[in-house]
Amino acid sequence: MENLNYGVVGNCRSAALISEKGSLDWLCLPQFDSSSAFAKILDKEKGGSFEIIPEKLIRSVQYYKKNTNILHTRFICKDGIFELVDFMPRYITENNDYYSPPDLVRYFKHIKGKPTFRIHYNPKLDYARNHTQNKYAQFDFIKSYTTSGTYDSLYLYTSFNCHSILNHDIICLEKHEFCLVSYNQKLLKQTDERIYLILQRTKTYWLNWSEKTKIHPKYKDEINRSALVLKLLNYQKSGAILAAITTSLPETIGEVRNWDYRFCWIRDGSMVVKILTQLGHYKVAQRYLDFIMDIIPEKKEKVQIMYGINGEKKLSEYELDHLAGYEGSKPVRVGNAAYKQKQNDIYGILLDLIHQQFELFENSLEHTEELCTIVRSIVNVVDENWRKPDRGIWEIRGKSLHFTFSKVMCWVAFDRAVKISKLLKSDYYVNKWTPLRDAVKEDIMNNAWSEKKQAFTQHYGSDDLDASVLLMENYGFIEATDQKYISTVLTIQKELEHDGLMFRYKNQDDFGTPKSAFTICSFWLINSLFKIGRKKEAKDKFDILMSYSNHLGLFSEDIDFDTKRMLGNFPQAYSHLAIIETAINFSEDEDEKPEGLIEQLNL
């Protein structure tokens, strides 16, 4: 049984997965959503990888350089010790621009002895759809290129002998060396000194970025690592936020719940940006809102649930039948057909973020006017649609229903629009939108509550439960002390929690019944328990859940209930923003409310 024991490195243009043994198993160039150059994670035979294979390995250990996205893999061998330092260059130039080329650097740091190893350099361009040829070029690099189908190419610059790499010869490391994988052919000669300088500049960039992260007294390391992961999912060019860097890592081994997550969901992106803003990273929010203003259509036109990272609206989905899939889990998908879905919850989450920006920052008149136009447009859309069914937060591909979470977020949309209007002293819109907010709340209270379950349920007229309903309190719809909310939390815990982890829901959907735990839902439960007064239980659960991360503290989308192995796309923005939110709640808890809150409320 394998786990997702990978480190992630990136530069806000693309990102790579490096296994705990130092194998490069996933990289798309020149950007996140490009076709893969290395995809061993999706097919061990055909996918392509870049492996370092020591001749006399005793053991290896992997870690991040503290407060950076620079990954170290230390190889302890009988004949010596060396470290493989992986990173993608990113730093600010003298012209105040970002240097983020489509490059991956593998810096070989000699530590002791004369360690020997072979390099297996085996790129498979264009998702391995056609043959990739490797050849030594007269300019002293290895060029890889497709010999049929769509043309693609890749360049490897190195201080090692190129022929030794191509022939898989044994290499003896006696000093620092490097390999540089680049989508572009380089104009300057790549030397040890130049590569070392890029490494130092990249390290400085990440240290400076981490220094801006607001310090909390508890779980500082967990917050900082998750913040660094979320930053890697921020696409520099447009400001978009990716849900994850991978495609088709299955929610359950052997099943078809495999999706491409290399896109920007309005919901996910807005939630990530809100949490990064709380940590003090304001530029991410400003650039994301610029992305939103660029992609939001003209007034009253439909807003999509998700977009391409450059604002693309059409994300047609197709399958790569020639790839075996992660541990045989097919299909492997590119694109995501969910972009066509109607999900009414996205509007409230976006307006919640915009409200945060109005509260925290003074905006220019032009910027304020643009944001206000978006607010009015969204309110009009929500007014037209909140009474209608949708596909919900979990993107059900079957029948549309009146999902409770979607209704709550429609309430949030009106509520935040009212609050923004109050900040701008616009009584007209306060008076116009307040009745809409009240109407949605009345509708939810009348239709989402189940007397049988003593809980708010997944959708109107149902007794099925859904973890997303736990967020009612988080968004201010209901108080944590409300008996109906407390009862809902306890009922959801009783029915959806299994061996300390949470189902999203248990009822059958388009693909059967869910079989794995959705990671963010376990954090939602922890937060909810904490809010209703079960603080010790919540903190104990948090510590246990954090132990299910991989060796570097990274999380994917799902966790297997029985084995606790991670599943789903990786690293997952949802999971890491939930870690930060939970840790912040614990850190900022200064009151000493009694543990017996539930008993005091006679529940």
Image (cartoon, rainbow, N blue to C red):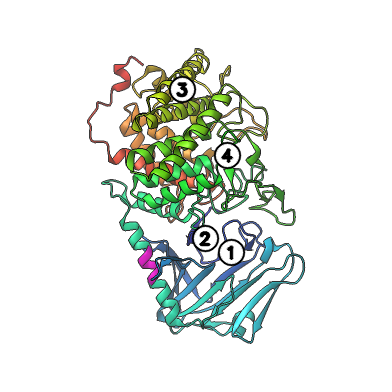
- Residue 282's spot in the image, x, y percent? 37, 49
SS at mark 3 in the image: helix
SS at mark 4 in the image: loop
Question: Sequence-wise, which precedes: disc 3 or disc 2?
Answer: 2
- Residue 279's spot in the image, x, y percent? 34, 47
Give the answer, above or below, for where 437 lies relative to 176.
Answer: above
Q: Which residue is mark 2?
A: 13
Q: Nearer the viewer, mark 3 or mark 2?
A: 2
Residue type for callout 2 = Arg
Residue 499 seen in render: no
Crowding at mark 2 (Cα within 10 Å: few <14, some 14-19, many 20+): many
Question: Sequence-wise, which precedes: disc 2 or disc 4?
Answer: 2
Residue type for callout 3 = Thr
Q: Nearer the viewer, mark 3 or mark 4?
A: 4
Q: Quadrant of residue 129?
A: bottom right
Q: Which residue is mark 1?
A: 30
Question: Sequence-wise, which precedes: disc 1 or disc 3?
Answer: 1
Q: CA distance from mark 1 to mark 3?
A: 48 Å
Q: Which residue is mark 4?
A: 298
